[in-house]
Image: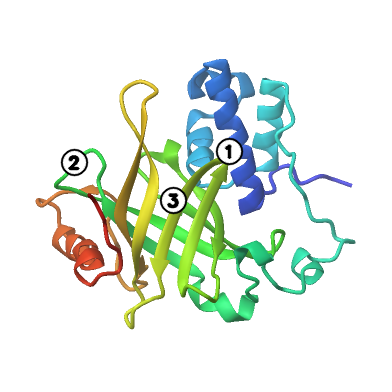
Amino acid sequence: MSIQTDSRLSAGESSAVSQRVREELARRRITRQQLAVDAKISLSTLEKALSGKRPFTLTTTVRLEEALGIALREFRVPTTDAPAAADTHNGLAPEGLGSYARPAVKWIEGDYLTLRPSFGDADAVYAYRTEIAWDSEASCLGFREADRIDSDFTQWGEVSIPHQSGHIYLVTNRHGQYRLIVVARPTITGEMHGILTTLQAGRGAQLTPVATPICFVPMPKDKSVKFGRLTISDGGFDAYKALLESTLEDSYVRFLAL
């Protein structure tokens, strides 16, 4: 019986492998180029997998494991004779995420153009894509970012939708380090406005807590969108900026200071 060594890992499996590879690169202080050479894969393949533009394949993962001398697949792999995780949880998210049922939150699944002010340029808007989808293994909604020009900072995590507050929480937890997005329920046109709290990278190892407006816009299917850092000279900048400004002007969020 032949083994399909080019099979793709699931989104959750790819995320776990990507995170572990990044940690090993930082710990060993080696470059991606060196790792690609050691694993006998192309640098382009490694870059696209780490950025989330392409899932890891089994072949690539095995070669990385051999090059690094560690197991990268320390996640749960569903088997054909095991019941689906969603069935195990009766299709309900954990209580800590709001105990929501998938049919009740299916409306939020999809791709979103994600907008926030640029951290490096006060007069620019930073745009990328966020996918929200049901994670059968975890029995909850998960999210993953993509199309970021700073792909090393790509985030993914779980979505909490409690009934009490009427807000939606996108939570990243990496070894106890949290990043949190809180957005209001969608407007009549589908946008979700809110606030992002995270750490901003500074000089050297300096990290500074920051908070900024953020907006999720359903990805249009009939036209292309622009990602990256957009300034006033770029087409689409005015529309992106107006969406972010409405986050504050329409009181979706408030910033308080003494």
The residue sitting at 37% across, 72% down in the picture is: 221
Q: Is residue 115 left or right of residue 31?
A: left
Farthest front residue in view: 258
List x then y, in percent, for residue 2: 84, 45
Cα–Cα span, label 3 and label 1: 13 Å
Residue that badge 3 annotates: 146
Q: Amino acid at mark 1?
A: Ser
Residue that badge 2 annotates: 121
Q: Nearer the viewer, residue 22 or 59?
A: 22
Farthest left residue in view: 233
**In this rendering, the label closer to the viewer, 2 or 1:** 2
Q: Amino acid at mark 2?
A: Asp
Q: Mark 2 and mark 3 in contact (Cβ < 8 Å)? A: no
Q: Residues within 10 Å of mark 2 (few under 14, many from 20)?
A: few
Q: Residues within 10 Å of mark 1 (few under 14, many from 20)?
A: many
Residue that badge 1 annotates: 18
List x then y, in percent, for residue 201: 35, 32
